[in-house]
Structure formats: structure tokens, C-alpha cells
Image: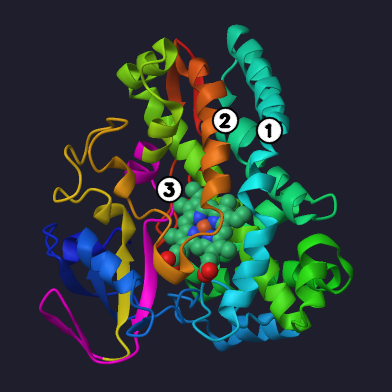
Amino acid sequence: MLFRGWGDAVDGRWPDVATVVDHVGVGHLVVTRHSLVRQVLADPVAFRPDNALDAVTPLPVAALRVLAGHRFRLPPTLANNGGASHPEIRGIVADALHPTRVAAQRPWLTGLVRERVARLRATLDAGVPVDLYADLAADLPLLVLARLVELPDAPVGAVKEFARAALELFWAPLDEPRQRALAAEVGRFHTVLRGFAATGGGLAARLRAAGHSPDVVVGALFFLLVAGQETTSQFLTLLLHRLTGEPTVRAGLRAGSVAVADVVEEGLRLEPPIVTWRRVAAVDATLGGTAVPAGTSVVLWLARAGRDPEVVLAPDEFRPGQRGSRRHLAFGAGAHRCVGAQLARLEAAVVVAEATPLLDGVRVVRPPWCPDNLTFRMPDAFVVARR
Ligand code: HEM
């Protein structure tokens, strides 16, 4: 979903590109067509990533003061870095998430998910509802990430709270008191991260050894602790929810006629946790015949591009393996394409393989609710019970 109000602004009919004015009066060019979204992502000279982490509700002085009190700084490191340092920082992160290292997590992760699923099954059998967000999906990606980038015994609750606060602070429509509260939460965690960035091993040590400043080390860890875990736990929740309403897909998985990997891709296409991503026009450009003046905020509607009928045979149907299923842009494209894609896919594959059988014979007591947010879906509790 985009900001809820935007659908009304264009009367529900979305052209390939449309200018929409947001809640603070800023105009954004929303791009919906797959080929145009790709065009923007593939051209980092005309469309730079500098605005990727800008707050959509500008931060008022009071919130900026709170952040400054924590010496909060977010220099360009990864997603918002269109500069010369990007390839090197990205390379160091990509090494930590190398496909071999990611694949090596599979046995451990499978064991953990299996254990959780057995517990959840016993609870359901006893007639007690379970929350598949809190009890299965919420912390799994963080636990895996902590092993890969060598975080100290990650204080799971604190990281989750901070990450969700950051997604709200930077991408939600907000009032000032809420911005101040979120700034305090994000600022507190930034202080903790600074300590770790200065002395921690693993990824932090490798960034330091490559000569990056303390601000850059903190900035990279800050982004990774949000992007590297919150996205995936949201996706796992959204995908499991979707699968409760897809009995034919579940039957195919049971029978072995539907591949787990195809379910994951179709899930990424139809239920991406990141629905939009931003770029800023660096020069006067055109997109599908529309003039785009330099400085325009370009909102790439990744979720909509995944349902482009020019690319996918049955755009709104969950048909694993269908033509175009894998051509979604859930992970972006080009120089900034998600470096964690392999890891997210592995985590989702393990959860689909191990947890989908749980969904047979359950009813949804409470579907996950998603707050208004430009970019992240942020589902909350997803409660099911035996039928
Ligand atoms: C389902 C889960 C995930 C989704 C949908 C997702 C999506 C995205 C998207 C849309 C981008 C921006 C791409 C662009 O600008 O072209 C991105 C960037 C990034 N993601 Fe992911 N992501 C996921 C999981 C992860 C994980 C697990 C990690 C790491 C552990 C990760 C790390 C990153 C990093 C570091 C970047 C910035 C890359 C760069 O600028 O060079 N993501 N991701």
C-alpha cells in the first residue's frame, strides 16, 4: 500500500506516472509501470538514491534537537549513497552476506523453525490461538543476521523497537509529539550502536579496518539492523497470512507439485514488505513521455510494478512459477539492488517449507494490521486458531 489517501488523489486510476501531493504539500512523481521503474533504477546518474532515507514528514526543530542530543548522524553509506564510497562499503557488507555464508545458516535455521513450529502446533492442538508474527516471524531474521555480521548477543526486543521506530519516523505521516517520541527512541539506540561500532568485531571491525569513519560504521550498522531484519520478518508474516487464503498452493506444496522457491518468489511479487522506494531526479529527464524536472522526488511503486499485466500472466493471482513471477522488483535493481536478497529468500524458503503445514485446519482470528506508511507494510499481530 502507498499512503492510504493517495488512491483518492488520483481517483483510483493510476497512470504510468502521476504527480501526487503528500500530507505536507510536497509533490512526488509516482511511477507504476514495471519498465519505467526499472529504467529509473538502472540509471543512477539521472536518478540518484540520495533521498532514500529522507523523512517524508520533515523533522521539526524539536525532534532534530532530540536527535542532536544523541549525536545522531546518518551519513550516506548504503541505500542513500550515490557517492564514490558506495561500492566499497557495499562490497564489505556483501562479503559478510556471501551466498556461501548464507547457505551455511540453513541447517541451524531449519532446526530453530522446526522447534518453534512444533511448539506452535502443540499450542494450537490445545485449543489456544497463536500469533505467527510474535511467536514465529518477528525475531528470526535478526537472530540470523546477528550470526552473519557478528553482533553481540543482540538485545532482540530493543532492536525490534528501534527498527520499527525508525521506519515510522522516516516513512510515516506524523505529528510533532510522535516525532519527538520516535526521535528519542531512535537516538537512544544510535548511542548504543556507537559503542558497538567502536569496539565490535565482525562487520564493524571490517569497516573500521577499511578506514571508514566511526559515523560511517554506525550508519552502515544502523541501516543493516533495519533493512536486514525488519523487512524479512514483515515479509514472513505477510506471506504466511497470504498462504492461509491459498489452499490450492498449500496442497501443491504438500504434494510436492509446487516448489517452495516459486512460492517465495510469487510471495515477493504479491506481498512485498517494501511497497515503494525513492530516487531523486538529478537532471531534467523524461519518463514515459512525462517531463521530470531536476529535484523531483520519484516514488517507485515496486508493489504495483510486480502486478504489471505487461510482465505477469495473471497479475493478481498467486500462481507459483507463472510467467513473469520472478520478474518482480521487490529487491530493487541496479547498483543498489538489495544485498540481502539471497538471505531473505533462504529465510522465507525455510519458513514456507516448515510452517505452511501449520496453516492447514486453522482459521484467522486476527489478520495483521498495517499502519499508514509510504514504504513499509509493518504488519503487527497475526493470530490463528484451530478451526
Ligand atoms: C524480503 C526482504 C527484503 C526486501 C523486500 C528488501 C528490499 C530492498 C530494497 C527495495 C532495497 C533498495 C534497492 C534499490 O535501491 O534498488 C534494498 C536495499 C538493501 N537491502 Fe534489502 N530487502 C530485504 C531484505 C534484506 C536483508 C535480509 C538484508 C541484509 C541482511 C538487506 C540489506 C540491504 C542493503 C544493505 C541494501 C542497500 C544496498 C545498496 O544500497 O547497495 N535487505 N532492499
Residue underneath mark 2: 350
Report x, y in % for residue 59: 52, 81
Instruction: Say which of 318 and 148 sits in front.
Output: 148
Report x, y in % for residue 325: 29, 41
Disc assigned to residue 297: none
Residue underneath mark 3: 370
Q: Earlier in the sequence, mark 2 or mark 3?
A: 2
Q: Residue at x 52, y 37 (%)?
A: 348
The segment highlighted magenta reads 266-293
Disc assigned to residue 109: 1
Instruction: Say which of 44 and 134 sits in front.
Output: 44
Q: Earlier in the sequence, mark 1 or mark 3?
A: 1
**On screen, residue 138 above or below 77:** above
Q: Are marks 1 and 3 in contact (CB under 8 Å)?
A: no
**On screen, residue 321 above or below 335:** above
* Quarter of the rendering containing residue 291: bottom left
Instruction: Say which of 169 and 86 sits in front.
Output: 86
Q: Residue at x 43, y 23 (%)?
A: 364
Q: Is residue 286 magenta?
A: yes
In-image side of 111 versus 291 (left or right): right
